[in-house]
Image: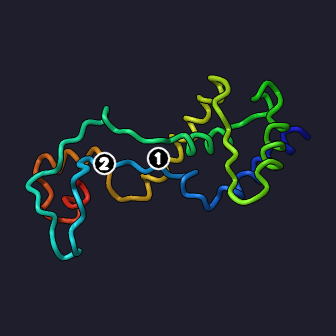
Amino acid sequence: PEGYQLKLLKLLHLEKIANRSDRWTVKIKPRDLDSNPSASSDIPILMDQAPKFDPSKVKFDGSRVISTCRLVALTTADYDGEAIDVLTKGLLENSNGDHDFMVDRQSSALEYRALTCLARLTTGALELYPSKVRVDMKDLADGKFTFHSKEWTAAH
């Protein structure tokens, strides 16, 4: 019964955030903040090579997506056994307008499950695209893409 009740509460929360893109996606700033898109799709980007990219300098706020993953990964043991009460209270407090209920970091176990969920969602999203980022970046560096091809433009 507890497991069923938790799943039902999780479903109700997920229904409320299903169409909120900030709960499912993360926006990452471009590599070159001064770079702008072309004025038109038939005007190429005027660059000779892709801007340098330092992954350690990437800044983004993934707290909402992680919260969604925590919700998906939540068990009855989380919140010191009070997960059902916390979800119920969250539904009652957020019944009007935007559903801003967030599942905060609780334990290492929940965080591990949430990050596993995030990895699965990310992998699933990337598999929707025909290319692989590492291979494309290597091919781009090796000059395998035609200057201003779709792949070259995507990397810029």
Mark with earlier residue (1, 2): 1
Indicate the amino acid at tag 2: Val
Q: Which colour scheme is used?
A: rainbow
Q: Residues within 10 Å of mark 1 (few under 14, many from 20)?
A: few
- Residue 41, position as x, y percentages in the image: 23, 74
Which mark, by number, is residue 131? Answer: none
- Residue 57, position as x, y percentages in the image: 31, 35
**What SS does tag 1 mark?**
helix
Q: Quadrant of residue 82?
A: top right
Q: In this view, does 52 lie to the left or right of 84?
A: left
What residue is shown with label 1? Answer: 123
Q: Residues within 10 Å of mark 2 (few under 14, many from 20)?
A: few
Q: In this view, does 86 lie to the left or right of 153?
A: right
What residue is shown with label 2? Answer: 133
- Residue 138, position as x, y percentages in the image: 19, 45
Indicate the amino acid at tag 1: Thr
